[in-house]
Amino acid sequence: MLQKILSYKLVFIAIIVVIILVRIPTIGLRTIHIDEGMGIRASELVLSGQWHYSPQNGHGATLFYIGSIIRNFFGTNILFFRAITSLFIILGLFILLMTYRHKLDNFSILLFLGGLGFSSGMLFFGNYFIHESLFILLTILTLVSVEYFFKTNKGVWLTISIVFLSLMYMTKETALLTYASWTIAGVVILFFDKNFKKFKKIFTLKNIIFIILGFLISTILYFLFFGKSLDLIKAPYIWITTRGSNMHIQPWYYFIVLLFLHESFLLISGLASAILLTLKKQWQPRQLFFFLWFLTILIIYSAIPYKTPWLILNIILPLGLFVTFSFSEIYKKLNKIFVISFLVILFLISLTCLFSDNFLHPDRAEKYDYAYLQSGNGLLQLTNIIKSISLLDQTPLSIQIVGQGDELLYVLTEKYNRTYEPFTPGLPVYINYLHSTEEIKEILSKTGYNYTFLKFTYFAPGPDIDLFIREDKWNAYKYSSNFIKPKTILSDGTLLYK
């Protein structure tokens, strides 16, 4: 028996090691995402004390404060920023496994590791420096804190739960949607379980003091992160009346399609679990809670026109937990060979999705791909060309950004001698974004220098970006070993990179 237990543990450890190792090469496979540029820029502003929360287009400061530490030690290297968010996901899954390990049999642990550990979305968006990874970690910490309160009946866990609950909102305003789904699931469970005494024990005098302490700490943290501004409180209304109703519009079935195409293991096994649990009348409170959390958050996100693919992490998490706690019960009642064969087939399909999404096509941005607003090969070529030209001289390369110098461009050009307005004639490189190309051509023609004109795809879907390189620099670069040939040369001499 001891040998059997040890062999299982070795298998689990091996799987966990693979889950960690598979994330390492994917950290650098994708070009920088536009939101990553915004996050790194905001982290720099936090470091210099200049960051201000924007309810129109910006989430909470928690990620930026963490980013400011990375920025202080490692500069703007995207790999270090992505590494920390990847660790958030790994840490969150590890905390869940440690919390629930005594409630799970070996088969359920395999389901957990296979479903959430090898989820394509958990890997794809975990390797982005965006708020969602930190938000998922805080969601898990809140959930686990509540679990420990009901397990130990110690009021300090109520304090911890409220602090993490508050930090969720300070990270992303979408925390309100998770609160709503938890409230609905909790109320249903309360009447399903009919254990009202368990609920009443929360509101003892001692626990109320711990609850007040939690709100007090949360208030201190709020003012620490946001100063005296109450913009975060107003943000949901501003978001609903502006961005929420006219940006990133997708059909109501968007997330269902994403689940089917990228998370088939969890979706199909979850659907099978729900049907069989209903037919066999085997629903338990924890299973029902995770299922209702999954179902309500899916319905809420589907009903809102504004949809970005990284939101799916909030749907994958409860679905994965539901499958973990449900399928082992079904496994005991059905033909074991059939169930295992069914799961192996689904898992192989999911592995194929994971490999395709994260290794083969990490920058592909079709309608139902995970990549969205993703800068592709064009931007990668642009940065490589600028880097090669900068290596031609010993002095820092001088670049001027004309038009709109957004956060992504700011991050990508930080290491060069970069200027904006007013226009400085005769520089080796100009970057033109969201400004008339013809106007820049005319201005440069009057400087007395000849420039080679290159055009790149900035991000998909999105506008192009222009690069003007002084002819002497271009000729030197053209005969270097790092030269990247353009895809097309247009009739007017424009070099087209896509």
Image (cartoon, grey):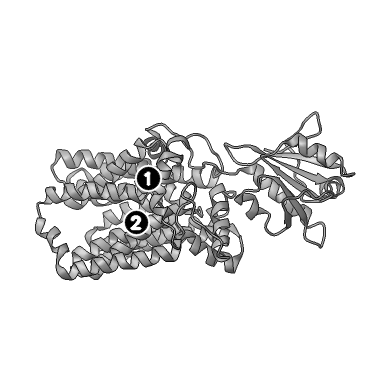
Q: Which residue type carries mark 2?
A: Thr
Q: Which residue is mark 2?
A: 139
Label ID, residue 347: 1
Q: Is residue 324 left or right of residue 32?
A: left
Residue at the right extreme, as displayed: 448
- Circle 1 — which element? helix
* Residue 367 rendering spot, x and y as whole percentages: 49, 34
Which mark is first along the chain, 2 or 1?
Answer: 2
- Identified at 57% across, 36% down, the residue is 461
Q: Of the residues shown, which amino acid type is indicated by label 1?
A: Phe
Which numbered dot is residue 292? none
- Rendered position, 76 above or below 454: below
Decide: is 72 above or below 194: below
Q: Is residue 189 above or below residue 70?
A: above
Quarter in which the N terminus is drawn: bottom left
Q: Nearer the viewer, residue 87 or 359?
A: 87
